Amino acid sequence: MIVLSTYGDIRLNDLEFVPDFYEYRLDLSEDYFAIPQFFTNIKTILTLRDADEGGLYNGNLPQKIDFLYEKIKIDNFYADIELKYISQIPFECNDKVILSYHDNGYNPLQKLKTILSHIKFNFGFFYKFVFKIDTYFDLIEMHKLLINKGVKYTLISTGKLSVFSRVLYKYLNCYVTYIGMPNKITAHNQISLNDYFKYNMGIIDRNTKITGLLGGKQIFNSIGIEYYNAIFKSKKINKVYIPLFCNELNDFIYLIQSKVIDLQAISITMPFKQIIAVYLNEEIPINYWNIYNNDHYLTDEEAVVKCIDKVIENRITQFILLGSGTMTELFLKHISPYTINLIGRNNTHLEHLRHKYNLKSELNYGDKICLINTTPLGLDNENVLTSFHIDKFDFVIDLPYNKEHTPLIKYCIKNRIAYIDGIQFWYWQAEKQLSLFLEN
Protein backbone atom coordinates (compact mmCIF):
# COMPACT_ATOMS: atom_id res chain seq x y z
CA MET A 1 0.00 0.00 0.00
CA ILE A 2 1.04 3.59 -0.62
CA VAL A 3 0.61 6.29 2.00
CA LEU A 4 0.75 9.85 0.65
CA SER A 5 2.00 12.14 3.40
CA THR A 6 1.32 15.87 3.52
CA TYR A 7 0.67 18.82 5.85
CA GLY A 8 -0.57 22.41 5.99
CA ASP A 9 -2.52 23.83 3.07
CA ILE A 10 -3.34 21.08 0.59
CA ARG A 11 -4.17 20.86 -3.11
CA LEU A 12 -4.91 17.19 -3.64
CA ASN A 13 -8.15 17.09 -5.65
CA ASP A 14 -6.41 17.34 -9.03
CA LEU A 15 -3.75 14.69 -8.46
CA GLU A 16 -3.49 11.95 -11.09
CA PHE A 17 -2.90 9.50 -8.27
CA VAL A 18 -5.04 8.04 -5.51
CA PRO A 19 -3.08 6.47 -2.65
CA ASP A 20 -4.35 3.68 -0.42
CA PHE A 21 -4.03 5.99 2.58
CA TYR A 22 -3.29 9.63 3.24
CA GLU A 23 -1.19 10.78 6.17
CA TYR A 24 -1.85 14.25 7.50
CA ARG A 25 1.04 15.58 9.61
CA LEU A 26 -0.66 17.69 12.25
CA ASP A 27 2.70 18.31 13.92
CA LEU A 28 4.05 20.07 10.81
CA SER A 29 0.99 22.26 10.36
CA GLU A 30 0.21 25.63 11.91
CA ASP A 31 -2.60 24.28 14.12
CA TYR A 32 -1.81 20.93 15.73
CA PHE A 33 -5.48 20.06 16.11
CA ALA A 34 -7.00 21.35 12.85
CA ILE A 35 -7.82 18.75 10.16
CA PRO A 36 -8.73 19.87 6.60
CA GLN A 37 -12.21 18.85 5.46
CA PHE A 38 -10.65 16.97 2.54
CA PHE A 39 -9.65 14.07 4.83
CA THR A 40 -13.02 13.57 6.53
CA ASN A 41 -14.37 10.68 4.45
CA ILE A 42 -11.21 9.01 3.16
CA LYS A 43 -8.69 6.70 4.80
CA THR A 44 -6.38 9.06 6.63
CA ILE A 45 -3.67 8.56 9.23
CA LEU A 46 -3.27 11.46 11.64
CA THR A 47 0.27 12.01 12.91
CA LEU A 48 1.16 14.29 15.79
CA ARG A 49 4.77 13.35 16.32
CA ASP A 50 7.02 14.48 19.15
CA ALA A 51 10.20 16.44 18.47
CA ASP A 52 12.47 13.47 19.26
CA GLU A 53 10.84 11.53 16.41
CA GLY A 54 11.09 14.22 13.76
CA GLY A 55 7.95 16.19 14.55
CA LEU A 56 7.35 19.63 16.01
CA TYR A 57 4.89 18.75 18.78
CA ASN A 58 6.04 19.59 22.29
CA GLY A 59 2.61 19.82 23.86
CA ASN A 60 0.65 18.03 26.51
CA LEU A 61 0.74 14.21 26.18
CA PRO A 62 -2.72 13.48 27.68
CA GLN A 63 -4.24 16.10 25.37
CA LYS A 64 -2.53 14.47 22.39
CA ILE A 65 -3.72 10.96 23.29
CA ASP A 66 -7.27 12.12 24.04
CA PHE A 67 -7.47 14.03 20.75
CA LEU A 68 -6.27 11.06 18.67
CA TYR A 69 -8.54 8.67 20.60
CA GLU A 70 -11.55 10.85 19.80
CA LYS A 71 -10.62 11.01 16.12
CA ILE A 72 -10.29 7.23 15.95
CA LYS A 73 -13.52 6.35 17.76
CA ILE A 74 -15.83 9.14 16.59
CA ASP A 75 -14.49 10.32 13.24
CA ASN A 76 -13.04 7.01 11.99
CA PHE A 77 -9.49 8.26 11.44
CA TYR A 78 -6.34 6.20 11.89
CA ALA A 79 -3.52 7.48 14.11
CA ASP A 80 0.26 7.15 14.13
CA ILE A 81 1.41 7.01 17.75
CA GLU A 82 4.91 6.57 19.09
CA LEU A 83 5.63 3.07 20.33
CA LYS A 84 6.77 4.42 23.69
CA TYR A 85 3.18 5.51 24.42
CA ILE A 86 1.62 2.07 23.85
CA SER A 87 0.51 1.81 27.48
CA GLN A 88 -1.44 5.07 27.10
CA ILE A 89 -3.59 3.86 24.18
CA PRO A 90 -7.01 2.30 24.84
CA PHE A 91 -7.15 -1.28 23.52
CA GLU A 92 -10.38 -0.66 21.59
CA CYS A 93 -8.26 1.46 19.19
CA ASN A 94 -6.29 -1.65 18.23
CA ASP A 95 -7.15 -1.81 14.52
CA LYS A 96 -6.73 1.94 13.91
CA VAL A 97 -3.31 2.61 15.44
CA ILE A 98 0.07 2.60 13.72
CA LEU A 99 2.81 2.16 16.31
CA SER A 100 5.97 3.91 15.18
CA TYR A 101 9.59 4.02 16.29
CA HIS A 102 12.27 6.39 14.94
CA ASP A 103 16.03 6.35 15.50
CA ASN A 104 18.61 8.12 13.34
CA GLY A 105 21.64 6.95 15.30
CA TYR A 106 24.18 4.21 14.68
CA ASN A 107 23.88 0.40 15.00
CA PRO A 108 20.28 0.11 13.75
CA LEU A 109 20.35 -3.71 13.66
CA GLN A 110 21.29 -4.02 17.31
CA LYS A 111 18.73 -1.38 18.30
CA LEU A 112 15.95 -3.24 16.50
CA LYS A 113 16.94 -6.48 18.25
CA THR A 114 16.67 -4.70 21.59
CA ILE A 115 13.28 -3.18 20.76
CA LEU A 116 11.82 -6.47 19.52
CA SER A 117 12.91 -8.24 22.68
CA HIS A 118 10.61 -5.93 24.68
CA ILE A 119 7.53 -5.83 22.43
CA LYS A 120 4.49 -8.06 22.72
CA PHE A 121 2.99 -7.94 19.24
CA ASN A 122 -0.67 -7.95 20.22
CA PHE A 123 -1.65 -4.40 19.38
CA GLY A 124 -1.86 -2.08 16.39
CA PHE A 125 -2.86 -1.95 12.71
CA PHE A 126 0.81 -2.19 11.67
CA TYR A 127 4.23 -1.33 13.07
CA LYS A 128 6.42 1.33 11.53
CA PHE A 129 10.18 1.26 12.16
CA VAL A 130 12.36 4.08 10.85
CA PHE A 131 16.15 3.88 11.15
CA LYS A 132 19.23 5.35 9.52
CA ILE A 133 20.21 2.25 7.53
CA ASP A 134 23.28 2.53 5.30
CA THR A 135 24.14 -1.12 4.51
CA TYR A 136 22.31 -3.93 2.75
CA PHE A 137 23.42 -6.30 5.49
CA ASP A 138 21.62 -4.30 8.17
CA LEU A 139 18.53 -3.78 6.03
CA ILE A 140 18.12 -7.45 5.09
CA GLU A 141 18.89 -8.76 8.59
CA MET A 142 16.42 -6.30 10.11
CA HIS A 143 13.72 -7.49 7.73
CA LYS A 144 14.46 -11.11 8.66
CA LEU A 145 13.90 -10.24 12.31
CA LEU A 146 10.56 -8.61 11.55
CA ILE A 147 9.37 -11.36 9.19
CA ASN A 148 9.90 -13.90 11.94
CA LYS A 149 7.51 -11.93 14.17
CA GLY A 150 4.63 -12.60 11.77
CA VAL A 151 3.11 -9.12 12.02
CA LYS A 152 2.36 -6.34 9.55
CA TYR A 153 5.20 -3.84 9.51
CA THR A 154 7.13 -1.37 7.44
CA LEU A 155 10.86 -0.75 7.77
CA ILE A 156 12.12 2.52 6.30
CA SER A 157 15.65 3.83 5.97
CA THR A 158 16.34 7.54 6.33
CA GLY A 159 19.98 6.82 5.47
CA LYS A 160 21.79 5.92 2.28
CA LEU A 161 19.36 3.11 1.46
CA SER A 162 16.33 5.37 1.76
CA VAL A 163 15.27 5.09 -1.90
CA PHE A 164 15.98 1.37 -2.00
CA SER A 165 13.91 0.59 1.11
CA ARG A 166 10.95 2.67 -0.03
CA VAL A 167 10.79 1.79 -3.74
CA LEU A 168 11.20 -1.96 -3.18
CA TYR A 169 9.02 -2.17 -0.08
CA LYS A 170 6.95 -5.05 -1.52
CA TYR A 171 10.09 -7.11 -2.13
CA LEU A 172 11.07 -6.45 1.47
CA ASN A 173 7.72 -7.71 2.83
CA CYS A 174 6.68 -4.26 4.06
CA TYR A 175 2.97 -3.57 4.44
CA VAL A 176 3.17 0.04 3.22
CA THR A 177 5.59 2.68 2.05
CA TYR A 178 5.33 6.44 2.46
CA ILE A 179 5.76 9.09 -0.23
CA GLY A 180 5.53 12.88 0.03
CA MET A 181 4.28 15.71 -2.10
CA PRO A 182 6.94 17.39 -4.28
CA ASN A 183 8.47 20.32 -2.38
CA LYS A 184 6.53 19.25 0.71
CA ILE A 185 8.48 16.30 2.07
CA THR A 186 7.47 15.22 5.57
CA ALA A 187 10.45 13.02 6.52
CA HIS A 188 14.20 12.95 5.99
CA ASN A 189 15.16 11.44 2.61
CA GLN A 190 11.53 10.67 1.81
CA ILE A 191 10.74 9.98 -1.83
CA SER A 192 8.10 12.12 -3.51
CA LEU A 193 5.14 11.56 -5.79
CA ASN A 194 7.45 12.50 -8.67
CA ASP A 195 9.74 9.65 -7.63
CA TYR A 196 6.78 7.27 -7.53
CA PHE A 197 6.26 7.88 -11.25
CA LYS A 198 9.98 8.05 -12.06
CA TYR A 199 10.60 4.59 -10.62
CA ASN A 200 7.38 3.11 -12.10
CA MET A 201 6.42 2.07 -8.56
CA GLY A 202 2.86 1.30 -9.62
CA ILE A 203 4.02 -1.83 -11.49
CA ILE A 204 6.46 -3.20 -8.92
CA ASP A 205 5.56 -6.54 -7.40
CA ARG A 206 7.48 -9.68 -6.44
CA ASN A 207 7.75 -10.62 -10.15
CA THR A 208 9.38 -7.34 -11.21
CA LYS A 209 12.92 -7.68 -12.56
CA ILE A 210 15.23 -5.23 -10.83
CA THR A 211 18.05 -3.42 -12.62
CA GLY A 212 19.93 -0.36 -11.50
CA LEU A 213 23.05 1.73 -11.14
CA LEU A 214 25.71 0.76 -8.59
CA GLY A 215 27.91 3.53 -7.23
CA GLY A 216 28.33 6.34 -4.72
CA LYS A 217 26.22 9.42 -4.06
CA GLN A 218 26.38 10.54 -7.71
CA ILE A 219 23.98 7.77 -8.76
CA PHE A 220 20.97 9.71 -7.47
CA ASN A 221 21.57 12.37 -10.15
CA SER A 222 21.98 9.85 -12.96
CA ILE A 223 19.90 10.50 -16.07
CA GLY A 224 19.74 6.73 -16.48
CA ILE A 225 17.03 6.45 -13.81
CA GLU A 226 14.38 8.24 -15.86
CA TYR A 227 15.81 7.10 -19.22
CA TYR A 228 15.60 3.35 -18.66
CA ASN A 229 12.38 3.43 -16.63
CA ALA A 230 10.63 5.45 -19.33
CA ILE A 231 11.64 2.88 -21.95
CA PHE A 232 10.60 -0.09 -19.79
CA LYS A 233 7.24 1.59 -19.23
CA SER A 234 6.70 2.40 -22.91
CA LYS A 235 7.44 -1.22 -23.85
CA LYS A 236 5.25 -2.54 -20.99
CA ILE A 237 8.13 -4.52 -19.51
CA ASN A 238 7.85 -5.50 -15.84
CA LYS A 239 11.29 -4.17 -15.01
CA VAL A 240 12.60 -1.12 -13.13
CA TYR A 241 15.95 0.68 -12.86
CA ILE A 242 16.89 2.05 -9.44
CA PRO A 243 19.90 3.62 -7.70
CA LEU A 244 21.97 1.02 -5.82
CA PHE A 245 24.06 2.95 -3.36
CA CYS A 246 27.07 1.11 -1.96
CA ASN A 247 30.10 1.86 0.20
CA GLU A 248 31.69 -1.59 0.13
CA LEU A 249 31.47 -4.24 -2.59
CA ASN A 250 31.13 -7.05 -0.03
CA ASP A 251 27.92 -5.45 1.20
CA PHE A 252 26.46 -5.42 -2.31
CA ILE A 253 27.53 -9.03 -2.87
CA TYR A 254 25.66 -9.90 0.32
CA LEU A 255 22.52 -8.37 -1.22
CA ILE A 256 22.94 -10.51 -4.34
CA GLN A 257 23.58 -13.70 -2.40
CA SER A 258 20.64 -13.10 -0.05
CA LYS A 259 18.30 -13.44 -3.06
CA VAL A 260 15.81 -11.16 -1.34
CA ILE A 261 15.70 -8.98 -4.47
CA ASP A 262 15.41 -10.34 -8.02
CA LEU A 263 18.44 -8.33 -9.13
CA GLN A 264 18.95 -9.03 -12.81
CA ALA A 265 21.59 -6.70 -14.26
CA ILE A 266 23.32 -3.49 -13.26
CA SER A 267 25.17 -0.52 -14.63
CA ILE A 268 28.33 0.31 -12.71
CA THR A 269 29.89 3.69 -12.08
CA MET A 270 32.87 4.91 -10.11
CA PRO A 271 34.45 3.73 -7.91
CA PHE A 272 33.25 0.19 -8.66
CA LYS A 273 34.19 -0.30 -12.33
CA GLN A 274 37.63 -1.61 -11.46
CA ILE A 275 36.61 -3.17 -8.12
CA ILE A 276 33.96 -5.42 -9.69
CA ALA A 277 36.33 -6.28 -12.52
CA VAL A 278 38.76 -7.63 -9.94
CA TYR A 279 35.93 -9.53 -8.24
CA LEU A 280 35.06 -11.14 -11.59
CA ASN A 281 38.75 -11.84 -12.39
CA GLU A 282 38.74 -9.42 -15.32
CA GLU A 283 41.76 -7.32 -16.24
CA ILE A 284 39.81 -4.40 -17.70
CA PRO A 285 37.11 -2.38 -15.90
CA ILE A 286 33.42 -3.10 -16.51
CA ASN A 287 30.34 -0.91 -16.32
CA TYR A 288 27.62 -3.48 -17.10
CA TRP A 289 27.10 -6.80 -15.33
CA ASN A 290 24.34 -9.32 -15.98
CA ILE A 291 24.11 -11.08 -12.64
CA TYR A 292 22.01 -13.95 -14.05
CA ASN A 293 24.53 -15.18 -16.63
CA ASN A 294 27.65 -13.27 -15.54
CA ASP A 295 28.04 -11.45 -18.88
CA HIS A 296 29.84 -8.14 -18.45
CA TYR A 297 30.95 -5.31 -20.70
CA LEU A 298 32.69 -1.96 -20.77
CA THR A 299 30.22 0.05 -22.82
CA ASP A 300 32.16 3.23 -21.98
CA GLU A 301 34.65 2.21 -24.63
CA GLU A 302 32.11 2.66 -27.41
CA ALA A 303 31.50 6.22 -26.21
CA VAL A 304 35.25 6.91 -25.99
CA VAL A 305 35.72 5.79 -29.60
CA LYS A 306 32.94 8.11 -30.76
CA CYS A 307 34.50 11.00 -28.83
CA ILE A 308 37.93 10.49 -30.36
CA ASP A 309 36.45 10.14 -33.84
CA LYS A 310 34.86 13.59 -33.42
CA VAL A 311 38.18 15.06 -32.28
CA ILE A 312 40.12 13.57 -35.18
CA GLU A 313 37.46 14.85 -37.61
CA ASN A 314 38.47 18.32 -36.39
CA ARG A 315 42.11 17.51 -37.25
CA ILE A 316 43.23 17.59 -33.63
CA THR A 317 46.05 15.26 -32.58
CA GLN A 318 47.19 16.89 -29.34
CA PHE A 319 45.57 16.26 -25.96
CA ILE A 320 45.58 17.58 -22.43
CA LEU A 321 44.21 14.67 -20.42
CA LEU A 322 43.05 15.31 -16.83
CA GLY A 323 42.91 12.38 -14.42
CA SER A 324 44.68 9.16 -13.49
CA GLY A 325 41.89 6.61 -13.01
CA THR A 326 39.93 4.06 -15.01
CA MET A 327 38.45 6.48 -17.55
CA THR A 328 41.80 8.20 -18.02
CA GLU A 329 43.40 4.93 -19.01
CA LEU A 330 40.51 4.08 -21.31
CA PHE A 331 41.11 7.31 -23.24
CA LEU A 332 44.86 6.66 -23.23
CA LYS A 333 44.24 3.33 -24.90
CA HIS A 334 42.85 5.17 -27.92
CA ILE A 335 44.96 8.35 -28.04
CA SER A 336 48.39 7.10 -26.92
CA PRO A 337 49.92 7.40 -30.43
CA TYR A 338 49.31 11.14 -30.26
CA THR A 339 50.91 13.91 -28.22
CA ILE A 340 49.48 13.94 -24.68
CA ASN A 341 50.06 16.08 -21.63
CA LEU A 342 48.76 13.97 -18.74
CA ILE A 343 47.78 16.01 -15.67
CA GLY A 344 46.37 14.92 -12.32
CA ARG A 345 46.85 14.89 -8.56
CA ASN A 346 48.05 11.33 -7.99
CA ASN A 347 51.70 11.52 -9.07
CA THR A 348 52.27 7.79 -8.56
CA HIS A 349 49.45 6.86 -10.93
CA LEU A 350 50.50 9.55 -13.41
CA GLU A 351 54.07 8.27 -13.62
CA HIS A 352 52.83 4.71 -14.04
CA LEU A 353 50.59 5.72 -16.95
CA ARG A 354 53.27 7.86 -18.60
CA HIS A 355 55.66 4.94 -18.53
CA LYS A 356 53.06 2.33 -19.56
CA TYR A 357 51.93 4.31 -22.61
CA ASN A 358 55.29 5.96 -23.42
CA LEU A 359 53.61 9.36 -23.54
CA LYS A 360 54.88 12.34 -25.49
CA SER A 361 54.03 15.50 -23.56
CA GLU A 362 55.71 18.22 -25.67
CA LEU A 363 52.63 20.09 -26.87
CA ASN A 364 52.84 22.52 -29.75
CA TYR A 365 50.58 25.35 -28.62
CA GLY A 366 50.50 26.68 -32.15
CA ASP A 367 48.35 23.69 -33.17
CA LYS A 368 44.90 22.65 -31.97
CA ILE A 369 44.53 20.91 -28.60
CA CYS A 370 41.71 18.82 -27.14
CA LEU A 371 41.14 19.02 -23.38
CA ILE A 372 39.67 15.83 -21.84
CA ASN A 373 38.43 15.91 -18.24
CA THR A 374 37.96 12.40 -16.79
CA THR A 375 37.99 13.60 -13.17
CA PRO A 376 34.82 14.25 -11.09
CA LEU A 377 35.73 17.95 -10.95
CA GLY A 378 32.71 19.88 -12.12
CA LEU A 379 30.07 17.78 -10.36
CA ASP A 380 30.06 20.21 -7.44
CA ASN A 381 30.70 23.27 -9.61
CA GLU A 382 34.51 23.04 -9.42
CA ASN A 383 36.42 24.77 -12.20
CA VAL A 384 39.08 22.46 -13.67
CA LEU A 385 40.65 25.36 -15.59
CA THR A 386 41.62 27.19 -12.42
CA SER A 387 42.40 23.95 -10.57
CA PHE A 388 45.00 22.94 -13.16
CA HIS A 389 45.86 26.38 -14.61
CA ILE A 390 44.83 25.53 -18.19
CA ASP A 391 44.09 28.32 -20.66
CA LYS A 392 44.73 26.96 -24.17
CA PHE A 393 42.51 24.40 -25.92
CA ASP A 394 40.25 24.17 -28.96
CA PHE A 395 37.97 21.24 -28.20
CA VAL A 396 36.65 19.80 -24.91
CA ILE A 397 35.44 16.41 -23.70
CA ASP A 398 34.04 16.86 -20.17
CA LEU A 399 32.74 13.65 -18.58
CA PRO A 400 31.07 14.94 -15.36
CA TYR A 401 27.44 15.93 -15.73
CA ASN A 402 24.77 17.34 -13.50
CA LYS A 403 21.43 19.07 -13.86
CA GLU A 404 23.28 22.19 -14.99
CA HIS A 405 26.33 22.60 -17.20
CA THR A 406 29.69 22.27 -15.47
CA PRO A 407 31.86 25.42 -15.31
CA LEU A 408 34.05 23.95 -18.09
CA ILE A 409 31.09 23.52 -20.45
CA LYS A 410 29.80 26.99 -19.57
CA TYR A 411 33.22 28.34 -20.52
CA CYS A 412 33.05 26.51 -23.85
CA ILE A 413 29.60 27.91 -24.62
CA LYS A 414 30.66 31.44 -23.73
CA ASN A 415 33.82 31.24 -25.86
CA ARG A 416 32.32 29.20 -28.71
CA ILE A 417 34.60 26.22 -28.19
CA ALA A 418 33.39 22.87 -29.55
CA TYR A 419 32.64 20.31 -26.82
CA ILE A 420 31.22 16.93 -25.93
CA ASP A 421 29.65 16.98 -22.47
CA GLY A 422 29.02 14.20 -19.99
CA ILE A 423 25.38 13.82 -21.02
CA GLN A 424 26.27 13.13 -24.64
CA PHE A 425 28.97 10.69 -23.51
CA TRP A 426 26.42 8.95 -21.27
CA TYR A 427 23.92 8.52 -24.11
CA TRP A 428 26.59 7.06 -26.39
CA GLN A 429 27.55 4.41 -23.84
CA ALA A 430 23.90 3.81 -22.92
CA GLU A 431 23.00 2.67 -26.44
CA LYS A 432 24.74 -0.65 -25.84
CA GLN A 433 23.47 -1.00 -22.26
CA LEU A 434 19.89 -0.45 -23.33
CA SER A 435 20.11 -3.28 -25.84
CA LEU A 436 21.52 -5.52 -23.11
CA PHE A 437 18.80 -4.60 -20.60
CA LEU A 438 16.10 -5.28 -23.20
CA GLU A 439 17.57 -8.63 -24.23
CA ASN A 440 17.08 -10.21 -20.82
Image (tube, rainbow, N blue to C red):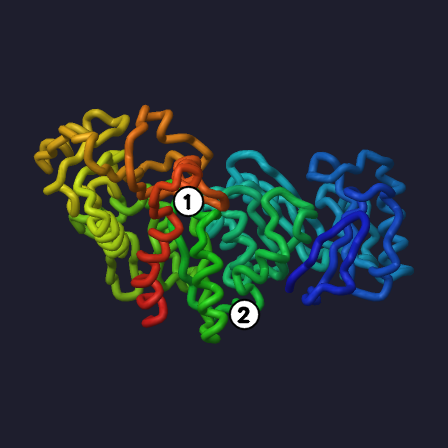
Image point 16% across, 31% down: which residue?
A: 364
Judging depth in this view, the residue of 143 and 245 nearest the camera is 245
Judging depth in this view, the residue of 348 and 392 nearest the camera is 392
Q: Identity of the amino acid at label 2?
A: Ile
- Please indicate whether residue 338 sits to the left or right of residue 388 in the image: left
Image point 71% across, 64% down: which residue?
A: 15
Image vertical order of residue 390 relative to residue 36, above or below: above
Judging depth in this view, the residue of 5 and 260 nearest the camera is 5
- Please indicate whether residue 362 sits to the left or right of residue 323 in the image: left
Residue 272: give x, y in percent of width and height. 31, 45
Residue 60: give x, y in percent of width and height. 87, 36
Secondary structure of residue under mark 2? helix
Q: Which residue is mark 1?
A: 401
Quarter of the image for residue 340 reads top left
- Please indicate whether residue 279 sits to the left or right of residue 271 in the image: left
Secondary structure of residue under mark 1? loop
Image point 52% across, 60% down: which residue?
A: 199
Q: Residues within 10 Å of mark 1 (few under 14, many from 20)?
A: many
Q: Which mark is residue 203?
A: 2
Q: Which mark is residue 231?
A: none
